[in-house]
Image (spheres, rainbow, N blue to C red):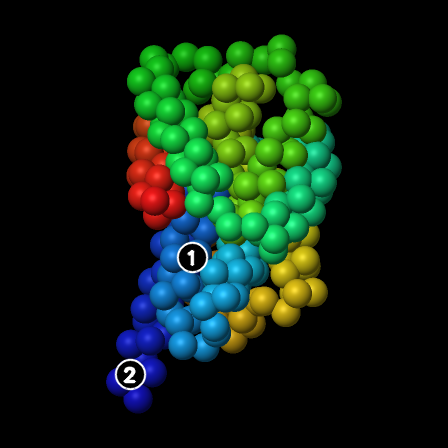
């Protein structure tokens, strides 16, 4: 009984941490969930498909996390639905491509390049002075740019089992000149759409571990809402820097894991 309790407490902690990141930073939480599922599901699956199952089950949980975060951000009026729908539309093609790349390829070179990209974005994002990234500069939010951002987020989301917010948030800030609060809130909607589509593809492949996914997702709802509420009241400059620190750590992990 004690082992059962400890197991689910551990699963709940992982789900809660991932959900808090989803709500607070507009990402899916896959940076925690993918390695977590890779660890706890060892022994249940062969080494040939274990990584795929970890990615697929992570996306399944992200569906729950991102939906709760999206509803909360929408309540606080931090979601730009026009931009979000256009980015999500671009993400559909990206998700399909990402799932197929995951199925047919190893990811060491891509992960290492993505890690260096994350580190560079993090350094730039952290070092910038307060201003346009807090309030948004406007003028570059076009249909083509939104579709392009969505495509990039969709590929990353489904390929790595993350929500895609690690791409969608900084690209909205830098490429679309959106304010950080709007970028985080809108990203939660984009992440939800990407996760639903990506999870559908992995369910078709039979790679989602529903028992593990439901157990973790059950602990996620409260923490996702709490993270979104904290984001709504956080100072924009600190929210941006916190996100930059997360990107930096994530980039380092990807570089060393790919080695």
Q: Judge by depth and name the residue closer to the eye, 135 or 43.
A: 43
Which quadrant does the N terminus fall into? Answer: bottom left
Residue nearest the observer in this picture, 231 or 196: 196
Quadrant the C terminus occupies: top left
Q: Nearer the N terminus, badge 1 or badge 2?
A: 2
Numbered badge on residue 13: none
Q: Give the quadrant of residue 9.
A: bottom left
Where residue 38 appears, as percent x and y from the top left, is 41, 63
The residue lying toward the viewer, choosing from 233 and 17, is 17
Label 1 crowding class (10 Å Cα cut-off): few <14, some 14-19, many 20+? many
Relative to 42, say whether 257 is above or below: above
Q: Tell me the element at label 1.
A: helix
The residue that appears at 35% across and 15% down in the rendered structure is 128
Cα gap from disc 1 to disc 2, whole angstroms: 21 Å
Residue designated by label 1: 33
145 is higher (above) or lower (below) than 26: above
- Furthest toward the left, the residue is 2
Q: Position of residue 130 (x, y in %)?
A: 36, 15
Percent across and percent down for residue 194 are 63, 46
Residue drawn 64% across the image and 33% down it: 150
Mark 2 surroundings within 10 Å by alpha-carbon count, few (fewer than 14), some (14 through 19), many (20 or more) = few
Q: Is disc 2 placed on a helix, strand or loop?
A: helix
Label 2 sits on residue = 3
Residue toward you, 82 or 29: 29
Residue 109 in the image: above or below residue 116 = below
Q: Is residue 42 visible?
A: yes
Which residue is painted at 45% across and 77% down in the image? 44
Q: Is residue 80 left or right of residue 237?
A: right
């Amino acid at each position: 009984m004690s082992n059962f309790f400890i197991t689910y407490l551990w699963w709940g902690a992982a789900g809660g941490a991932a959900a808090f990141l989803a709500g607070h930073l507009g990402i899916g939480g896959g940076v925690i969930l993918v390695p977590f599922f890779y660890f706890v599901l060892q022994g249940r699956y062969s080494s040939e498909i274990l990584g795929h199952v970890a990615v697929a089950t992570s996306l399944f949980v992200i569906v729950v996390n991102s939906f709760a975060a999206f509803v909360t951000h929408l309540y606080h009026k931090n979601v730009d639905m026009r931009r979000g729908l256009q980015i999500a539309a671009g993400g559909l093609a990206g998700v399909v491509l990402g799932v197929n790349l995951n199925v047919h390829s190893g990811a060491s070179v891509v992960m290492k390049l993505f890690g260096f990209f994350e580190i560079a974005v993090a350094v730039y994002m952290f070092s910038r002075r307060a201003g346009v990234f807090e309030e948004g500069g406007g003028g570059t939010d076009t249909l083509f740019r939104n579709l392009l951002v969505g495509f990039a987020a969709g590929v990353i989301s489904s390929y790595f089992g993350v929500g895609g917010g690690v791409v969608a948030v900084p690209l909205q800030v830098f490429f679309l000149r959106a304010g950080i609060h709007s970028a985080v809130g809108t990203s939660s909607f984009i992440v939800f759409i990407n996760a639903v589509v990506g999870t559908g593809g992995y369910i078709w492949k039979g790679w989602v571990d529903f028992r593990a996914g439901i157990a973790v997702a059950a602990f996620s709802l409260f923490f996702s809402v709490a993270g979104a509420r904290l984001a709504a009241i956080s100072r924009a400059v600190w929210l941006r820097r916190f996100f930059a620190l997360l990107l930096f750590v994530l980039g380092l992990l990807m570089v060393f894991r790919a080695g």
